Each structure stands twice: as structure tokens, then as C-alpha cells.
Amino acid sequence: MVRRDQRMQKVGIIGVGNAGGQTADQGKKDFGIDGVALNTSNDDISTIKNIDVICIGDEKGAGKDRTIAKQFLRDNMKKLLSMDVMLRVIEENNVIFIPGSTGGGSGSAIGPVLTHIFSGYFPNKKFIPIGILPPLKESVAAQQNTIEYMKEIKQINPTFMLYDNEKRAHKTRSEMFHEVNREIVEDIAIIRGDYQYTTPYTSIDERDSWKILNTPGRLVVAKVSGFREKDIDDKSIEDRLIDSLKVSAHAELDRDMIIRKFGLITNLSEKIHKAFDPTMPKFKSILGEPVEEFEHIYINGVNDDVNRVIAIMSGLSIPDDRIEKIAQRIAEVEAQLTRTKETSLLDDVKTDLIKSLRQTETISKRISEDNLDDEFSKFM
């Protein structure tokens, strides 16, 4: 049996809002990741089964209103800082992820504020917010909340991660949520060091990992696994890794090609290891040349079933192309709501006939001896 290194980081999850709480719950269920769920809605946290829950405010939710959620947080901040279930997740781990929907009320509002306050209150811990973007067809209020969330992320400049429900918008709602949440917790497990095995070759140690995670900017994980020697004849590992980002739940990358830190983790059979170029020139020509690189190389002998390559990139930019799509969606809806017409169909509708049809009594033409012959002649 392969002996796994002591995990590089001790990680925990503080899930905020419904989306964040479900992510934290799944992290505990699937990977045993320590966590707690924080929400303003008692209905939402009632579905959490595997971790502790905290409800603040009047327990009726924030109604997608970021102002209300922030007020609830402000009123309960001192309480949160003294609660055992919250302190345990923070004190027993050194990297704490804070996932939440950017389009909602609780997750969108509380995530950035909590990151900022906890980072100052616990300076030896690393807090990483994880934003989950709404599909573009979701309400304009959700898009507006997302813009405000991203502005606050830019303001506090943490290490952060972004996933996008738009990438799974073709699925049912339940499938979309489950797949995105599953990918988030898989990436957290990777960052924890779940796939780094004891190796006589170069390795990423705890300090290297900390440098990657402690770099301000966006953090992205690309991963491929399960390929065999014959498979890479048709498509290289680099191409597979590039394609993995296109189909992953990560929000699209900015095209400025800025990568500050780069960690490469390989677990390959000896033949594939010899054929693989760890400098990955094609991958870097598309995504960018990192400022600093780290490698963890493991050769699994002849076991061709567990081939895996992972790239962890940090210091990336906010994805302006994706933000522009959100801004366009907001602008389109605002244009529809504020549009005025100089003319209307009402101006051309004739109402004389309508009035005549609405008469409630019959008015007969008066006939007298003077016009009797004329009226009679109509029937002759």
C-alpha cells in the first residue's frame, strides 16, 4: 500500500448561505473535511446533516438582500468569535475555505466580510473565499449581487476561488448544484494534499504549499486522471489538462496570462513519466508563464490505473470576460425596465366603434309621415 505523506495543510470549511452550507456538508461527507455551516435561514440549515450549523438574525433568511445579511453578521460578530463550533474549525485548521453563492443574500454578503474580519482576527490562519457564480439566466438581482461581491473581493485582495453554475446550466438544478459542490470539495482535498505521496523525488512540502495558497489573487486547480499510455498517443497530457479547465466548474480564466505561483503534482507510471515534459510548454503558452514553480513527482511503478496530473495555480486575475457578461445581462434588463416610448398603440386605437358596441339600449331612428315613404321604399 502506498503511504501518503502527512497532509500538507489542515483545512476546514465555513460554508455561508445555502450553497456554502451544502458545500461544507458535502466536504465532510465525501472527504471528511472539518466544517461548519453559517446561515440566516433556519429552513436552509435544516437540510445540513454532517456538520454543525449556526443561524444568525431572525432565522427567516436575508431575502437575497446583502444589506440585511451584513446587518445580521454585524449584530452577531462578537458571538461568532466566541462560539465553540466556529472556533474549533478555525483553531484546528490553518487554511479555512469560505464558500458561498455570489448571487444570494447571505453567502454573497457575508463571505467577503467574514474573510476580512477573520483574517485580521486570526493572522496566522489563511481564509480563502470561494464564490459560486449564478447562471446568466438567473435574476438580475443575483447578477447585481455578484458584481458587489466581486468588488469587495477586489477591495480586500485575498486568495480566492471562483466556480460557475453557468458551466452546468444545461443540467437540472439539483445536478448543477451537486456537480459544482463536488468539484469544489475535490479541489479542497487536492489542496489539503490528498494526492501527494511519499516520494524520493522532488516534492511540494508544507512551506511550498503555503506560499502557493498565500499569494493574493485567484486560485485555480486543473486536474486529469485515469488515462493510460495508449490514450496519450491521441491526446497529450498537456492538452488534456487544458481541456479539463474548459469543462470544469471553474469560472473561465482571464486572458492576461498572469500566473504568480504554480504547483505541479504528478502520479504517473514509469513509461508515462519518462515521456511527460513537466515544464509543460504548451500549457504555459496558453495560460501564462508562472513567476515561481513547485513540483511533486511520484512514480507509481507499472500501475497504469492511477495516472494523475494536477496543476495548482495562484495569483491569477479576476476574470473580466465573465464579469463583462454579467454586466451586459444587468444592462439589458435595466434597458428593458427603463425604456420609454414616444408613441404607443393606444394612440392609434379607434374607440368610436367600441363605444357604439357598448350601448346598453337600442335607439331607433324616428319615423314620421314626412319620411315614411323613404323608409318604406327600402323594402320595395
Image: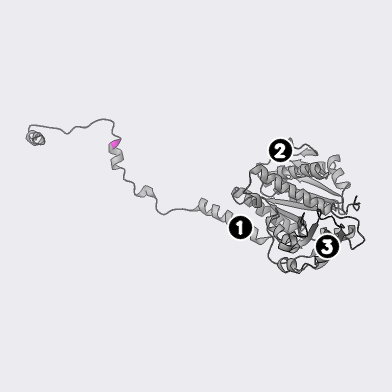
Residue type, mark 3 in image: Lys
Q: Tag 3: Cα neighbours inside 10 Å, few (<14), some, or many (≥20)?
A: few
Q: Which mark is residue 325?
A: 1
Residue at image position (31%, 43%) is 351
Using residue 359 as the reference point, say whether residue 54 is left or right of it. Answer: right
Could you give the CA–CA distance between mark 1 and mark 2, rounded to whole angstroms? 29 Å
Sequence-first tag of 2 and 3: 2
Sequence-first tag of 1 and 2: 2
Could you give the CA–CA distance between mark 1 and mark 3, rounded to whole angstroms? 44 Å
Residue 269: in magenta span = no
Residue at image position (6%, 34%) is 373
Looking at the image, which is closer to me, 177 or 369?
Answer: 177
Q: Which mark is residue 44?
A: 2
Could you give the CA–CA distance between mark 2 and mark 3, rounded to whole angstroms? 50 Å
Using residue 236 as the reference point, say whether residue 269 is left or right of it. Answer: right
Q: Position of residue 173 (x, y in %)?
A: 64, 43
Which of the 4 image quarters holds residue 40? top right
The residue wearing badge 3 is 271
- What residue span does the magenta drawing correspond to? 357-361
Looking at the image, which is closer to me, 269 or 173?
Answer: 269
What kind of element bears circle 1? Answer: helix
Q: Does residue 117 appear in the picture of this structure?
A: no
- In the displayed structure, would residue 356 be above or below residue 101? above
Residue type, mark 1 in image: Lys
- In the displayed structure, would residue 58 be above or below residue 325? above
Which of the 4 image quarters holds residue 221? bottom right
